[in-house]
Amino acid sequence: MNNVTFTAGFTGLGALPISDAVFSGAIPSSASITAGDDNGASDGQIPVQLWTNNGSATLDCSGADLTSGSNTIPKSDISVSSSGTLAHPGTSLACVGALRGSSGVNDLNDTWTYAYAPTTLPAAGDYQTTITYTASQP
Amino acid sequence: MPSHAASVISVGGTGAAVSAQARLGVSVRIPRILYFRIGSGGAAVDSVDFTVRLANPLRRLDVVDQPYGGALPPRYTMIDGDSVGTSNGSLPVQVWTNNGSFVIDCTGAALSAGANTIPLTDISVRSSSGALPHPGSSASCTPTSAGHSGTNALSANWRYRYRPPTLPPAGDYATVLTYTVSQP
């Protein structure tokens, strides 16, 4: 299973260490988020592929909100963009089922880029979830 | 070369529905952040200054040496000032954290002028907000818990006052208080 990981820091302060650190000055007004993954691209990008000889397929996903103890981050806060022939089913992890491909043989490829840019920084914690993507045909 | 750990091939018979699933783990790491500011912030050390003056009818008595006649007035007044522009002994304070409640405390020696001292308990402090209280009712601090679980964005004005029952020996008394906000 591939993973996408986001780490929050403060704009203008570089990468904020996870361990305790001290800084002075006014509190920055916004957070900067760095994205990484475990498939070598290190930028929150995942290659995806759908091959079928049976016509178009419905692409969807399911999964719970990200949780850290009793705190949550809604799936809708994780945006996803596409650049190829296999668009993500919706603009965030709160997926909307969508038809992909056409009749006959389909060889669809894409790179999905996951991003997290919250307007306010959530409570501290390691938030996690697992998203299950499903391609189905009638 | 990218791995394809989450890939699956599904083969169905003619006319049967078919589906394929793949899983993706998503995680967000939010570090613990605790921000604390007293006064103008940054490296500057703000100050609160008190000047003792005699009460009416000598309210305008200058702080520099000068003689006056008659009986000693029974009372005196305090003029409060600070270095952040509010000029009333008030300092703005702010705590921001995404890591739940915290403990405020302070440490420092008594104010001293040569061998003479003014105890920290003589400097009273009152907060404008119960959500961000001063740790104790005087500069002789008592550790105090504040905030709640999750994110806290708190601000207040702490007003410092000096109303001694008896006038201390003349002198410029000074100290530096170090405030600490901590979380387990």
Image: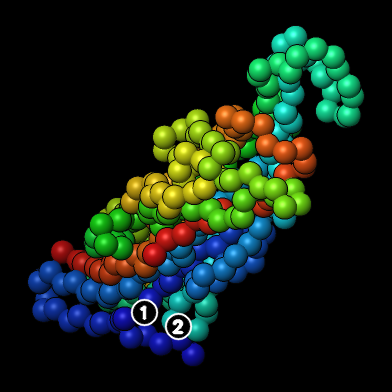
Q: Position of residue A68 (x, y in %)?
A: 30, 63
Q: Residue at x 46, y 59 (%)?
A: B182
Which of these two is toward me, B105 or B65?
Answer: B65
Secondary element at image label 1: strand
Do marks 1 and 2 share a subunit? yes
Which of these two is toward me, B27 or B41?
Answer: B41
Disc 2 marks a residue whose amino acid type is Asn
Which numbered dot is residue B130?
none
Q: Position of residue B123 (x, y in %)?
A: 58, 38
Q: Choose the circle earlier in sequence order: 1 or 2.
A: 1
Q: Residue at x 42, y 61 (%)?
A: B183
User: Is residue A60 depicted above or below B101 in this figure?
Assistant: below
Disc 1 marks a residue whose amino acid type is Asn
Q: Residue furthest front?
A: B71
User: Is residue B77 depicted above or below A88 in this figure?
Assistant: above
- In the figure, is residue B28 to the left or right of B162? left
Which numbered dot is residue A39?
2
Label 2: how many Cα within 10 Å (few below 14, some 14–19, many 20+): many
Label 1, label 2: how many angstroms apart (C-alpha)?
A: 7 Å
Label 1: how many Cα within 10 Å (few below 14, some 14–19, many 20+): some
- In the figure, is residue A131 to the left or right of B68? left
Contact between labelled residues 2 and 1, with CB atoms less than 8 Å apart: yes
Q: Residue at x 38, y 50 (%)?
A: B145
Q: Quadrant of residue B63?
A: top right
Instruction: Look at mark 1 in the image and give the residue it sits on.
Output: A2
